[in-house]
Image (cartoon, rainbow, N blue to C red):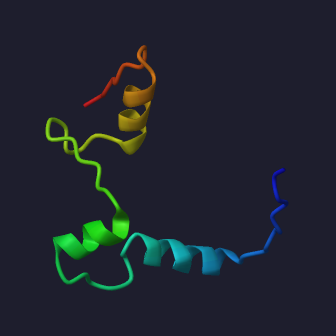
């Protein structure tokens, strides 16, 4: 049987602070290893370093998705 979860209210400012802290934007990190330990993984595309995250997600999950860039 699934347990019900309580709903909490969070202000936009508190949500922003939480997110900034979660993605290490609030303070410098000692080294790359510490950043990876905190984040868990980093997504990197060596072919298109300027690619959009959305494109990467859709490409890996949708076989018919094509990336089209307008330069």
The residue nearer to you, when weighing 1 against 62, is 1
Q: Specify the quadrant of the image occupied by residue 57.
A: top left
Q: Note whether 50 is above or below 26 in the view shown.
A: above
Left or right: residue 42 compared with residue 63: left
**Percent position of residue 7, x then y:** 82, 68
Most extreme residue toward the top, as rendered? 64
**Percent position of residue 15, x then y:** 61, 74
Name the residue at 15% across, 35% down: 47
Left or right: residue 5 compared with residue 54: right
The quadrant the C terminus occupies is: top left
* Number of numbered discs overlaid on the protein picture: 0
Left or right: residue 17 compared with residue 30: right
Name the residue at 38% across, 27% down: 59
Q: Note whether 70 is above or below 45 in the view shown.
A: above
Name the residue at 34% across, 24% down: 67
**Percent position of residue 35, x then y:** 27, 72
């Amino acid at each position: 049987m699934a347990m019900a979860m309580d709903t909490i209210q969070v202000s936009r400012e508190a949500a922003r602070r939480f997110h900034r802290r979660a993605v290490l934007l609030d303070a410098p990190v000692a080294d790359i290893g510490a950043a990876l330990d905190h984040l868990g993984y980093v997504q990197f595309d060596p072919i298109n370093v300027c690619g959009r995250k959305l494109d990467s997600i859709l490409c890996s999950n949708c076989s018919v998705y094509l990336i089209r860039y307008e330069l």
